């Protein structure tokens, strides 16, 4: 295997970070219900990946050993996008993206509870710091009233992060049972799209009739954050320490918050900003200590 140069990996990570940081902005600009945006994003991404997915499945087909993990992972990926994207309708970009990056904490906690892999002391300390940061974000949003329903939005963002953690663990299990990364991602994206498609109908939202810019921003969501951003991170994680890549991902809330300031003039309250800083520090500490192998970033 040819190892790319450090400069190429740095450039790849930079491109991925910019693409993923645009996710929250595109969702806000789409100006449509979260489940509609989530369904459209994953449907388009799945269709764009379909030729590569079919080719990959010929080489590493679904079997009884890996199919249940891939399917369940896709369902949880759908749950992640449905909840996290919806959170942006109720809370600030800074709060949503910061709470959404707690996935490594949930991975470490889930591995401890369900797999019996106890995290080291510093990882536990990181979890406590992250919890403190999350509490500060909650108090900050509640005190300012700048968001329509900050408690709901923050809860949705945390739920999305927890679903993403389960998705990562199941995805790792599917790949360990013979499914290639390309085949797994294609299946997971497809299952996520299928699980999201009924939700607009269930919640009483229309699939059509939105302003033309809505469809444009959903298409950009599929192309940039989903395909360019995730692909860049996946490429980097093959050749770098996964914990280092996960730490770079923690810069996403900073990029998204700066873009929200420039585009929407959204200035989070000081306590929210402090909470985001504390939370990201705790997540970084957990990530570096537990060295959780993230197979796919999910913003």
Image (cartoon, grey):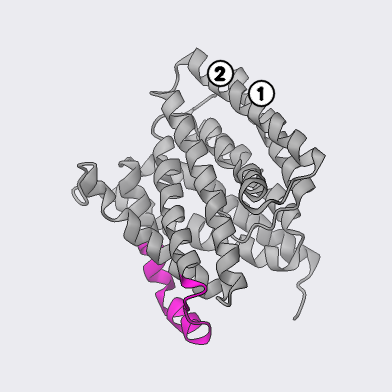
Whether residue 256 sits left or right of residue 190 in the image: it is right
Residue 289 visible = yes
Please give the name of the residue rendered at 53% of the width and 43% of the height, measured from the top-left corner.
Answer: 161
Whether residue 91 sits left or right of residue 118 in the image: it is left
- Determine contact: label 1, label 2, CB under 8 Å: yes
Residue indicated by mark 1: 274
256 or 202: nearer the eye?
Answer: 202
Above or below, 170 against 181 in this view is above
Residue stretch in magenta? 43-67
The earlier-in-sequence mark between 1 and 2 is: 2
Report the Cα–Cα distance between label 1 and label 2: 9 Å
Residue indicated by mark 2: 140
**Residue 44 falls inside the magenta stretch:** yes
Above or below, 197 against 109 in this view is below
Residue 198: give x, y in percent of width and height.
Answer: 26, 53
Residue 250: give x, y in percent of width and height.
Answer: 66, 44
Residue 259: give x, y in percent of width and height.
Answer: 54, 38
The kind of secondary structure element at disc 2 is helix
Whether residue 211 sits left or right of residue 79 in the image: it is left
Above or below, 297 against 259 in this view is below
Q: Which residue sits furthest top?
A: 143
Q: Quadrant of residue 151?
A: top left
- Majority secondary structure of the magenta segment? helix
257 or 96: nearer the eye?
Answer: 96
């Amino acid at each position: 295997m040819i190892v790319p140069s450090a400069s190429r990996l740095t450039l790849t990570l930079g491109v991925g970070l910019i693409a993923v940081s645009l996710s929250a902005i595109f969702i806000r600009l789409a100006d449509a219900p979260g489940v509609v945006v989530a369904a459209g994003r994953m449907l388009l991404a799945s269709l764009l990946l379909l030729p590569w997915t079919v080719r990959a499945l010929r080489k590493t087909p679904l079997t009884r050993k890996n199919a249940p993990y891939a399917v369940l992972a896709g369902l949880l990926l759908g749950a992640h996008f449905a909840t996290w994207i919806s959170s942006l309708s109720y809370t600030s970009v800074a709060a949503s993206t910061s709470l959404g990056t707690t996935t490594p904490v949930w991975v470490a906690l889930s591995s401890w509870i369900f797999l019996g892999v106890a995290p080291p002391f510093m990882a536990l300390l990181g979890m406590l710091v992250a919890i403190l940061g999350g509490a500060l974000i909650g108090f900050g949003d509640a005190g300012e009233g700048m968001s329509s329903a900050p408690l709901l939005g923050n809860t949705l963002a945390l739920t999305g992060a927890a679903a993403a953690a389960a998705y990562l663990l199941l995805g790792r299990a599917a790949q360990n049972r013979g499914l290639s990364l390309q085949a797994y991602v294609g299946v997971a994206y497809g299952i996520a799209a299928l699980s999201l498609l009924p939700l607009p109908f269930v919640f009483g939202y229309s699939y059509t009739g939105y302003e033309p810019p809505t469809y444009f921003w959903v298409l950009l969501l599929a192309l940039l954050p989903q395909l360019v951003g995730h692909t860049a991170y996946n490429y980097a994680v093959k050749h770098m320490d996964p914990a280092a890549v996960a730490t770079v991902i923690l810069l996403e809330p900073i990029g998204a918050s700066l873009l929200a300031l420039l585009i929407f003039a959204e200035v989070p309250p000081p306590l929210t900003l402090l909470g985001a800083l504390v939370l990201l520090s705790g997540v970084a500490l957990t990530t570096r200590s537990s060295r959780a192998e993230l197979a796919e970033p999910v913003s």
